[in-house]
Amino acid sequence: MNARKKMLLVSYLFPPIGGGGVTRAVKMARYLAESGWEVHVLTVESAYYATKDESLLKELPTNVTIHRAKEWNPLTGMRAARSQKSAGAQTQPEKNEKQPASQPGLKQRIKKKAVASLKSLKNTLMIPDDMIGWLPDAVKVGEQVIRQHHIPIMFSTSGPYTCHLVARNLKRKTGIKWIADFRDPWTQNMHRTGIAWREAWEERMERSVMREADAVTTVTNGFADNFQNKFGQEISRIEVIHNGFDPNDYTNIEQLADDGKFTCIYTGILYRERNPRLLLEAVAQLIEEQKVDRMLLNLQFAGVFDYPGYTDNIDCVRRFHLEDIVEIMGNLPHKKALAAMKAADTLLLIGDTAPGSGVYIPGKLYEYMAINHPILALSVEGESTKIIRQFGLGEVVDPKDIDQIKAAFLKIYQEWKVQQAEREHSSAKQEHASNSDNKNNIIQRAFDGDLAIYNRQIQARQLGELMEQLM
């Protein structure tokens, strides 16, 4: 192995929680290692998270070594406890159960107050994020790894932004070359605290990262433009390496049985600015107007439907009496999630509605692209809507316009009914051949066609070439 082809990857959670963009670190590690790089990963010690996918570690070759550093964090235990309780709790109503919305009980009100108190503590003490307690030991372990293995270059990926502070300290101590990767913006992020003194402090942190890194990478052209507009000549070099999907993940997806229903699935995390409540209301209205048959509907949600301590989304399900239609699947391993997506008829992309969200591309969009089922995107205009229109991936609607949501849902539902009727006149053999041809077409396009920039393997190659240029 080339002695120079060694790198340190700084990623707080490895494997990550969730999916989409946050699998970036694992895929980079895998494909860089397969191309001859000796990859060392600096991450936090193992801890329980409800949406952590340990199965991703099985993808890694033997020349990926994981080094874990300890974290001091007074919030970690409480966060893990809430995640464990959430993972084990039954939040999905039984089928055909009709429960009217009720006023929050004392226990629920106490939970909400506790969550608010924790957030206040985090915003006051944990800067830039509540993983900052990982920094001291991460720097100590990282320096040992760099010196012991003679590693010439480092790649830190955020969030959390603490990863970049760890990498900045390691560069200062060792002189290692450094690439800072932003999967999301930092001080230009749409989810900000609004605390002026804190944001000024974080801006100084971010500016030092931009100035001291040998190169900056990010995942959208919009992010890159915003970084350059804000920091200008302080950035030595900036490159866009998109998020994407791994064609290898789609070659042997489990085939689930078709129940004959119009199944729509959302995979990922929901929260205040990204929620399904207007979609649920739209579906309820279509049912009441007898434009769709509730007996043929199945709305699936895999991931985090309601954060621990919150019940806004499940309350909405009950308020519109959709318990027999909505299926809350909880967190699924990556392969299981892909199988569920493949078995669905429509893929739901529920985007953020916060100002500035148009420059974001949800990581799940790339997986939806690879699955190649129609997408119903409730998204503000921006980079993700351009991709959907460019590649003809589905319908785009204003996430705050219920009439648009109803019209798009009804259109896709009616198209599905036509396709169902056509399937009854085609043989299973012909359908299998069609699906196989379609799958191979998507995979081919991801290697040498118009989707190549979204291929995880090609993205790892881009990163490898950038590292060799910097060393």
Image (cartoon, rainbow, N blue to C red):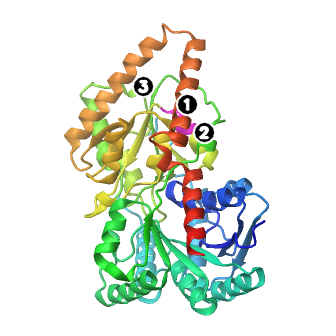
| Contact flag, marks 2 and 1 (Cβ < 8 Å) | yes
Instruction: Residue 45 in the image: state x and y as whole percent.
Output: 69, 75
Which residue has dot 1 on it? 439
Highlighted range, magenta: 339-344
* Whole-percent x, y for residue 104 in the image: 38, 62
Q: Earlier in the sequence, mark 3 or mark 1?
A: 3
Q: Is residue 95 visible?
A: no
Number of marks in picture: 3
Mark whose residue sits in front, 2 or 3:
2
The image shows residue 390 at horizontal and vertical percentages of 33, 40
Local packing at callout 2 (Cα closer than 10 Å; few below 14, some 14-19, many 20+) is: many
Along the viewing direction, whichever of 297 and 364 lies nearer the viewer:
364
- Mark 3 — residue? 296
Q: Front-most of 451 and 303?
A: 451
Question: Does dot 2 land on a helix, a strand or a loop?
Answer: helix
Q: Residue at x 47, y 80 (%)?
A: 129
Q: Which residue is tagged 2?
A: 250
Label 2 or label 3, whichever comes before in sequence order: 2
Residue 362 within the segment the image draws in magenta: no
Q: CA distance from mark 2 to mark 1?
A: 8 Å
Gap between marks 3 and 1 measured at Cα: 26 Å
Residue 242, compared with residue 195, is above or below; it is: above
